[in-house]
Image (spheres, coloured by chain):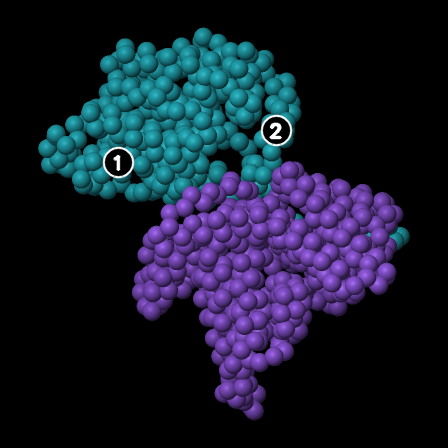
Chain colours: A purple, B cyan
């Protein structure tokens, strides 16, 4: 079920109508059934994998909890945790990375003159597998660490893993944040309904109007054999906004739908293109993944402890694996490495950069902020080129064309992209400086004003949408 | 009192939503097509009515459809060259194709491409709903204005399913077929288009079936089109051929192709229901039979009058690749029919063999 489909427009009101007629236990069973139905609409066969993850981690976590209570040895508990990790990573590795590693191995051996017949399998990638696997893993790890007691009710845990608004594209919720919401009775407040509607409408606007319209421009440019410098620049800028609106649009809808049912999902995007450094970018972009990587990978590896070289190594490993999480392709690995290098470079140059951009006057501070945002946006956009490219050859061709930014200047193309992005960027600037992520201020906006704003947005969603596209992050 | 206040507030919000959506639709039409913000805007703004019937309004414009100073779809006429007119209905006028993708435009570019220079002008003189009978009456006027050498006739036989409509149009040519009110909600049209795009085929078929049931109560429903209609159509096609030749225009007849192949799927049947919405008096099964018999009539006229024939009904592949609905072309369909007609016209004209100077001087 796509959020931007007629089927979902029928599915959601039915679920909501029944949801509010039930008590807490009934609501949980309903949501679990709805979530499994939601997932089965993609491909019912993959429900089996979801069940393996859910039941496997539920029983392993329960056992870990028992061992802790019984005072079992640390190494025994570590072994049990390793079983959970292995189970999750084998499933994820097989379905997502088997062909990638098989092909890469074949290419590597061929490059040293060793011809092999490494076979690949016709494997379909189960939708959302990276998201729900990470979420389920975080639960077991938290129980192992003693940060969380194991869940006693298997169906509540199943709902925590499969809760449909965030099942296939996040945000990746930590068990400490979501499980208590599943376990305790929920009362949807008026504010949650207002925020929920707002997020849903705004999310649809970003996804259907902005992202899908930009997609047609981006697809055209990235299909060119040898784009001009100008086309590359515009194509990459367009993709930067496409992927942002696509993914954050999905998250907004997910958070909005969850709010209608009284749940609070974590904020996943916080004006990322107004970041002034790579470090800040990763606190604003795909926040739930950044936090997962930090909590379960970067810190266990040592995090910021140790020598500079150790920290740089930790950063690079974390980001390369983060890149690989996105997809089984070398360009994602390169993109991850690039992000890691940016973080390393920023860490190494933080003091001189702070000195350079240090300004005392307000005008100087504003200029310093603008320059840093502009530079960071360019660096981010180059990362998107690596992310979106289909091959190493395309990366080379497009990177080469960037040295002639005005070659093939096309005012019409520029206007098309600017029409979708500039108003959004200006609005984000306003959000940034006003500190309000929700742009309809409920303090002054009467229902009539909100209805007018939402009608305006819905006009663009319904009648100015491009060809519907699947959400980009579904493939991850 | 509280309930009353709540109801009035909800109603107020609905009115606000409607007003905002309508304003957006009008602004959108204005920015995209230059449509007036205040006042009516419908496909009727493309037409006017004279003593013969409906015709294109000079410089008429509605959404992607734009008419020239003569009221024909396409660019202004250029001096010189060889002119070819395309006579027909909505299939020829073009509905679903991108602007410039309708088959007359594609025919012109193909002919000129093959000739190696811009010596051919194809003039699209068709209008949606135009019958062969009204086309015949317009031949004189078109011949004077356009001075064509050839005419491609791609007629829509569906217009002859119900002869009383043809007679009524003949009796009252100046009366618009569709009465319009002074004020239309433009957002309504947008929602109709959206519903067609997103509603499942089965749901649309169900809604159409209900409408047909309601409408068909006004007519005597037929299993098949009477022979009288076929012979009327045949006579009208023959009369058009004669009228064209009387003005020195050589016709080329094209049989009417549709989406439907030999075996009908459920989806095909749903399309027949969509077609029947326009002719509720004929049962779905009757449309295929009507097409076959009407096309036979066209073939007979071609043979009897010695007119060149492109048998599109026979040669054009069926299915949704070439048809956007039951009989209107997709871009690919328009391209294919233009190819077929261009090939036959080239053999009639002798492109590549004839001295192009002769064509240029015409």
Q: Is residue A180 left or right of residue A427?
A: right
Residue A124 percent coordinates (x, y): 55, 42
Query: Which residue is at 65% across, 23% downward?
Result: B214
Which quarter of the rendering shows the N terminus of chain A? top right
Pointer 2 local density, CA inside 10 Å: few below 14, some 14–19, many at least 20: few
Task: From the viewer's perspective, tell me whether residue B309 is left or right of residue B234.
Answer: left
Mark 1 — residue?
Answer: B110
Q: What is the secondary structure assignment of the residue under circle 1?
A: helix
State which chain disc 2 sits on.
B
Mark 2 or mark 1: whose residue is earlier in sequence = 1
Q: Is residue A363 above or below residue A159?
A: below
Rendering coords of residue B72 (x, y %): 35, 37
Residue pictured at 65% horizontal, 71% vertical: A299
Tell which subunit mark 1 falls on: B
* Residue carrying label 2: B202
| Of the pair A438 and A470, the residue shown nearer to us | A470
Q: Residues within 10 Å of mark 1 (few under 14, many from 20)?
A: some
User: Is any atom of residue A116 visible in this view?
Assistant: yes
Question: What residue sits 70% from the left and 48% below the top?
Answer: A53
Q: Quadrant of residue A6?
A: top right
Nearer to us in this view, B232 or B138 = B232
């Amino acid at each position: 079920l796509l959020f931007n489909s007629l089927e979902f427009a029928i599915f959601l009101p039915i679920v909501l109508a029944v949801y509010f007629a039930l008590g807490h236990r009934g609501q949980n069973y309903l949501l679990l059934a709805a979530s499994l139905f939601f997932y089965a609409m993609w491909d019912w066969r993959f429900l089996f994998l979801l069940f393996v993850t859910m039941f496997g981690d539920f029983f392993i976590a329960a056992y870990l909890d028992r061992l802790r209570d019984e005072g079992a040895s640390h190494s025994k508990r570590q072994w049990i945790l390793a079983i959970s990790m292995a189970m999750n990573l084998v499933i994820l590795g097989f379905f997502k990375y088997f062909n990638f590693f098989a092909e890469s191995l074949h290419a590597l051996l061929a490059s040293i003159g060793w011809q092999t017949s490494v076979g690949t399998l016709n494997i379909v990638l189960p939708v959302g597998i990276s998201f729900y696997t990470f979420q389920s893993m975080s639960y077991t790890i938290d129980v192992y660490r003693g940060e969380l007691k194991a869940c006693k009710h298997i169906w509540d845990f199943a709902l925590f893993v499969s809760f449909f608004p965030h099942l296939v594209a996040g945000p990746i919720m930590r068990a400490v944040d979501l499980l208590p919401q599943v376990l305790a009775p929920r009362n949807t407040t008026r504010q949650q309904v207002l925020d929920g509607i707002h997020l849903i409408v705004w999310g649809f606007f970003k996804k259907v109007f902005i992202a899908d319209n930009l997609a047609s421009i981006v697809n055209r440019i990235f299909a060119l054999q040898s784009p001009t410098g100008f086309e590359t620049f515009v194509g990459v800028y367009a993709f930067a906004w496409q992927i942002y609106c696509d993914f954050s649009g999905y998250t907004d809808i997910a958070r909005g739908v969850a709010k209608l049912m009284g749940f609070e999902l974590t904020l996943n995007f916080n004006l990322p293109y107004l970041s002034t450094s790579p470090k800040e970018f990763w606190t604003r972009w795909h926040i739930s993944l950044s936090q997962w990587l930090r909590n379960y990978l970067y810190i266990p590896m040592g995090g910021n402890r140790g020598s500079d070289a150790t920290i740089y190594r930790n950063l690079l490993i974390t980001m390369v694996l983060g890149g690989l999480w996105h997809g089984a392709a070398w360009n994602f690995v390169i993109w991850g490495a690039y992000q890691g290098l940016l973080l390393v470079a920023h860490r190494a140059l933080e003091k001189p950069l702070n000195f350079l951009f240090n300004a005392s006057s307000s005008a100087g501070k504003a200029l310093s902020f603008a320059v840093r945002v502009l530079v960071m946006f360019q660096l981010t956009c180059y990362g998107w080129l690596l992310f979106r490219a289909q091959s190493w050859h395309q990366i080379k061709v497009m990177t080469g064309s960037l040295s002639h930014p005005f070659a093939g200047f096309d005012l019409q193309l520029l206007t098309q992209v600017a029409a979708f992005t500039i108003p959004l960027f200006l609005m984000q600037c306003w959000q940034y400086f006003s500190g309000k992520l929700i742009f309809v201020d409920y303090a002054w906006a009467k229902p009539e004003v909100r209805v007018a704003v939402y009608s305006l947005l819905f006009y663009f969603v319904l009648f100015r949408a491009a060809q519907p596209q699947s959400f980009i992050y579904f493939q991850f | 009192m509280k309930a009353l206040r709540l109801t009035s507030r909800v109603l107020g919000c609905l009115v606000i939503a409607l007003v905002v959506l309508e304003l957006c639709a009008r602004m959108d039409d204005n920015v995209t097509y230059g449509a007036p913000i205040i006042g009516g805007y419908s496909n009727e703004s493309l037409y006017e009515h004279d003593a013969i019937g409906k015709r294109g309004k000079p410089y008429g414009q509605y959404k992607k459809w734009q008419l020239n100073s003569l009221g024909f779809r396409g660019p202004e006429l250029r001096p010189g060259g060889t002119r070819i007119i395309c006579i027909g209905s909505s299939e020829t006028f073009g509905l679903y194709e991108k602007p410039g993708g309708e088959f007359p435009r594609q025919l012109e570019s193909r002919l000129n491409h093959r000739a190696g220079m811009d010596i051919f002008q194809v003039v699209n003189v068709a209008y949606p709903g135009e019958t062969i009978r009204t086309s015949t009456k317009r031949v004189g006027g078109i011949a004077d204005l356009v001075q064509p050498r050839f005419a491609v006739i791609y007629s829509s036989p569906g217009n002859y399913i119900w002869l009383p409509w043809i007679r009524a149009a003949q009796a009252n040519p100046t009366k618009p077929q569709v009465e319009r009110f002074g004020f239309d909600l433009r957002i309504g049209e947008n929602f109709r288009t959206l519903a067609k795009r997103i509603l499942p085929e089965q749901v649309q078929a169900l809604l159409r079936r209900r409408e047909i049931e309601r409408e068909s109560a006004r007519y005597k429903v037929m299993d098949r089109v009477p022979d009288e209609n076929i012979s009327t159509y045949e006579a009208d096609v023959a009369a058009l051929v004669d009228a064209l030749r009387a003005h020195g225009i050589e016709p080329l007849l094209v049989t009417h192709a549709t989406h439907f192949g030999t075996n009908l799927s459920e989806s095909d049947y749903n399309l027949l229901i969509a077609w029947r919405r326009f002719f509720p008096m004929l049962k779905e099964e009757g449309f295929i039979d009507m097409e076959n018999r009407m096309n036979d009539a066209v073939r007979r006229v071609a043979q009897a009058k010695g007119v060149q024939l492109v048998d599109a009904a026979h040669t054009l592949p069926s299915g949704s690749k070439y048809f956007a609905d039951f009989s209107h072309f997709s871009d690919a369909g328009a391209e294919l029919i233009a190819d077929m007609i261009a090939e036959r016209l080239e053999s009639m004209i002798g492109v590549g063999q004839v001295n192009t100077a002769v064509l240029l001087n015409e």
